[in-house]
Amino acid sequence: MNGNTFRRMATTAVVSAGIAGGLVAGTGLAAAQTVEVPMSTCFGLSPYIVDQPYIASRAFFYQDGPGTGTVTLADVSSVVGFFTTPYLSDARLDWRNKTTGATGTLTATTPIALGNAVNLRMNSGPGEVEITRSAVNRNALWAIPTTSCTGTVRVN
């Protein structure tokens, strides 16, 4: 099994668990569903250098209310971080509602090992929302920024 296949399987498991948790914990919309948001590709080196690189080209959006929902940033993992201290990823998600002009920035820091994901609450209001993802990956020695990637999601 190559790293890409393993990463996709781990991402599917994490997203499925998050969806199940969201369905159990809240009432949500009657037709709420998670949608995959295709994005251009983000790329960056792992701070461990010999590790698999930081590569992401999608996000997931679960709408659970009018104009609001959870953006899940997944598809990033570290084989080295599984065996030693995971590196930290300072994730940033900038969003812009193309319909209303509203903007916002969401941030989170998460340890990166196998199958990690970041969940961010986005209250953009209804409309076509452009999301831009970037991160700075760091360990005790140095920090390495990633490129940015962009996609668009329809928020009702």
Image: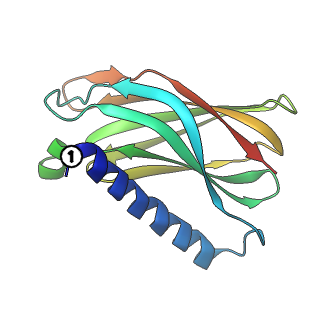
Tell me if I can see residue 134 in this picture: no
- Residue ID for mark 1: 2
Q: Amino acid at mark 1?
A: Asn
At horizontal 78% and vertical 37% (from top left) the residue drawn is 128
At horizontal 22% and vertical 35% (from top left) the residue drawn is 52
Question: In the current view of this chain or complex, which residue is farthest to the bottom?
Answer: 24
Q: Is 22 rendered above or below residue 114?
A: below
Q: Position of residue 27 (x, y in %)?
A: 72, 75
At horizontal 27% and vertical 25% (from top left) the residue drawn is 45
In the rendered structure, the answer to whether residue 136 lies left or right of residue 103 reads: left
In which quadrant of the rendered view does residue 53 lie? top left
At horizontal 56% and vertical 38% (from top left) the residue drawn is 38
Q: Position of residue 22 (x, y in %)?
A: 59, 69
Tell me if I can see residue 60 in this picture: yes
Q: Position of residue 142 (x, y in %)?
A: 24, 23
Q: Position of residue 85 (x, y in %)?
A: 18, 46
Along the viewing direction, whichever of 155 and 82 lies nearer the viewer = 155
